[in-house]
Image (spheres, rainbow, N blue to C red):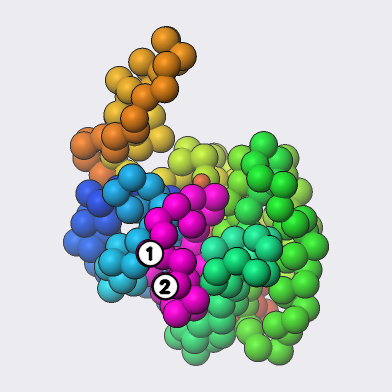
Amino acid sequence: MKPFTILMLGDVVGQNALAYLEKNLWRVRGELGASFAVVNGENVAVGNGIDPASAERLFRAGADVITTGNHVFRRKEVKSYLDDEPRLLRPANYPPACYGSGAYVADADGLRVLTVNLLGTVYMDPLASPFEVADKILAENKGTYDLAVVDFHAEATAEKIALGHYLSDRVVAFAGTHTHVATADLTVLPAGCGYITDLGMCGPEGTVLGVKKELIIEHFTTKMPVRHEIGDGKTVCHGALFTVDRATRRCIAARSVVF
Ligand SMILES: [Fe+2]
């Protein structure tokens, strides 16, 4: 039987990257045989965050679920959209009273996939523990999903690696996002969970995390605030493909994806 494959892509930075995904993501999914695709879209809108129109375009481009992070609420029009569109996630460890949800179960290629989006708490806002919130979501949804996937949007590598190991016997794919720099530690953890500390980004080459390098250099050399502008270099998308054995429902292979 054909294995189940999960494509996860790092933070989409800007509208050029969105247009690039519109042109290429379905083709890449076809070439990789990806059963399911999770894309982090928290930097896709003009001026950061995500707006409903960009989210709709990203879904049509081939994202089954869109994850986000610390910039999720930046665009005010996304707030009610988060309540109406369950496939767009905000980190689950925000207070329950805020908009949207941090978990969603999708039907994909014969399996029910729970995607969980969490935010780090080291060098970031002091939200609820991602460890405790993950425990709660996985337990509460028990019986409603066959596979669980996590996008952990976090800064500190230790927090990401620790949560990956902590969840590795309950999750089949665990990917970090947020730093926009892909790490070289893609692996399958012993419990059968594909793991990477950071997927990287889908954004312009020759920039500092997607922003025009001259502006960031100006900031670091003068310490003056600068208005961020997305670079206009060629878009490159970084992510990972996780292969899951349908019988054991564990990850058996992981490879990086660049296009
Ligand atoms: Fe972020």
Residue 120 in the image: above or below residue 51 = above
Which residue is situated farthest in the top direction here? 221
Q: Is residue 236 left or right of residue 223?
A: left
- Confirm whether residue 203 shows in the render: yes
- Confirm whether residue 1 shows in the render: no
Q: Main secondary structure of the magenta part?
A: loop
87 part of magenta stretch: yes
Badge 1: how crowded within 10 Å, few (<14), some, or many (20+)?
Answer: few
Q: CA distance from mark 1 to mark 2?
A: 7 Å
Q: Tell me where residue 249 sits by quadrant.
A: bottom right
Viewer-proximal residue among 24 and 137: 137
Q: Tell me where residue 60 sits by quadrant.
A: bottom left
User: Residue 163 in the image: x percent, y percent?
Assistant: 73, 53
The residue depicted at 58 percent of the width and 72 percent of the height is 101
The residue depicted at 21 percent of the width and 57 percent of the height is 19
| Amino acid type for the residue under numbered disc 1 | Glu
Badge 2: how crowded within 10 Å, few (<14), some, or many (20+)?
Answer: some
Instruction: Please tell me the numbered disc located at residue 171.
Output: none
Viewer-proximal residue among 244 and 81: 81
Residue 210 in the image: above or below residue 153 = above
Q: Which residue is mark 1?
A: 77
Q: Is residue 161 left or right of residue 71?
A: right
Q: Is residue 59 left or right of residue 121?
A: left
CB within 8 Å, label 1 to label 2: yes
Q: Secondary structure at mark 2?
A: helix
Residues drawn in magenta: 61-89
244 part of magenta stretch: no
| Amino acid type for the residue under numbered disc 2 | Tyr
Instruction: Please tell me the numbered disc located at residue 81.
Output: 2
